[in-house]
Every structure is written in C-alpha cells, then in structure tokens.
Image (cartoon, grey):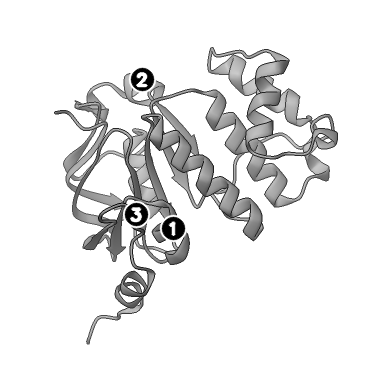
Amino acid sequence: MTSPLEARSLSLNREGNNVLDGVSFTVAEGEIFALLGGNGAGKSTTLLAFLGFLEPLEGEVLVNGTSVHGDVASARSAIAYLPEAAALYGHMTAYENLDYFLHLAGKPASRDGLDAALDRVALPEEARSRRLQSYSKGMRQKTAIALALLRETPIMLLDEPTSGLDPVAIDEFHDLVKTLAQGGQTILMVTHDVYGACQVADRVGLLRHGQLVGSFSAGNGKRIDTETVHAAFAEREVA
C-alpha cells in the first residue's frame, strides 16, 4: 500500500552544508509522525523537501507514491503547510487573511465556513474582525492553523505548530490534530518539544545532525514514554 509521505535515503545539501544524510521514513494515512530534533537537526529542511523547494542530493521524497520533483504541483495540492511563522498580513483582519489566501488556493469559503474553522482553533469572535497587527503571536498562530484546516487537504505538514500558544491552547491543538488524524488526514510535524511530540504522535523519529537516530512508537493505545524519548534526545555524542 502506498504511503502518503515517504523519504527514501534522503540526503540534502544547503549552502555547501550537508543538512540531511540518508534519512528514510514513511507516514501512513491517518498517522501522526513527529520528527523531533534540536536546532539545525534538519527538521524544517525535511518539510521543504516534501514541498519541492529543495532538491535532494541523493534519494527522493514521495507524496502519494509520486516523486515530488517529478510532479511538484500535484504534491503541493495535496498538502497544507503550517510554518512556524506564517506570513499573514498585519493590516488585514483574520477574515480577510483567510479569504485572500483561500482564493489564491482556489478554495474560497463562506463566512460560515471561516467561522467554523476559527471556532475549531478557539479564536475569539471579537478578534476576527480586528487587524492582525493587534494580535498576539498565539492568536496569529491560531489564524494560520485555521487557514491550514480550510485547505482541506489529505496531508498536513506542521513546523513547530504550537510555538507561541499557551498551555491550554497547546492541549486544544493536540486534540484537534488527533481528530484530524482519526478522520484520515496524514500529519507530519517537526518540533523540538519532547513532551508535545510524545503527547500527540503515533510515532516519533529522533533527528540528530541530519540523521534519523531513533524511532519510538505508541503501543496498545498508550502514549509514547516521554522519559525514554527525553533521555535519547538529551544524549550527546561521545567525542
């Protein structure tokens, strides 16, 4: 059976530096896979490869069984991407931002549809007609998450998705992600948050210096053991 997302022996070079070195993994339909690593581990680079913005030095990335660089447009049409700092317009309201970007994507939505998505991310009603320049980082992130939901794609890529959210909003977001996966959406998220990864993911892959050095799974409906993953994450190479 074809996996929605697959990296095959992926090696990637950026500005003369080897960022990824032989990384391989798959993400199944309806699965949440968290790629965990510190700064410079290659997490965001992996997402950019799936979006076709970076060409592999070796290996390949596939979306729905097709090489991304063989059909970039098809890959991107299947993916909603949530960057750590979404490029939303501060002089526009939440409604206006959503409406603008959805029209660009060819997926316009009604006001009721916009409100339904904003309800799901718990953005207060009174804020929706205010310009984003008055928003906190967490409120901007909620607007960006709503936009990703409204794309209604089978695959979602999340780059540090809970950055700027308070603890209650983080728990709400994790519940939302689990609901999406239960509905069949495939989710690849990258993060440096050990607890968050273990709380929400079905599997966690540990990325260090561009290599996948560990894999952890949630068995029998239980969460991945945070202490085990934290110990592996904190481990340092012996010189």
Task: Check disc 1: other Cα within 10 Å, few if <14, some if 14-19, many if 20+.
Answer: some
- Label 1's element? helix
Q: Residue at (61%, 23%) from the top-left corner? A: 101
Vertical position of residue 183 compared to residue 21: above or below: above
The answer to which of marks 1 and 3 sits earlier in the sequence is: 3
In this figure, which residue is indicated by the disc labeled 3? 35
In this figure, which residue is indicated by the disc labeled 1? 199
Q: CA distance from mark 1 to mark 3?
A: 13 Å
The image shows residue 159 at horizontal and vertical percentages of: 47, 48
Quadrant for the N terminus, please.
Answer: top left
Q: Are marks 1 and 3 in contact (CB under 8 Å)?
A: no
The amino acid type of the residue labelled 2 equals Ala
Which is more foreground, mark 1 or mark 3? Answer: 1
The image shows residue 208 at horizontal and vertical percentages of: 29, 66
In this figure, which residue is indicated by the disc labeled 2? 73
- Label 2's element? helix
Q: Residue at (63%, 60%) from the top-left corner? A: 167
Q: Is residue 158 rendered to the left or right of residue 72?
A: right
Q: CA distance from mark 1 to mark 2?
A: 33 Å
Which is more foreground, mark 3 or mark 2? Answer: 3
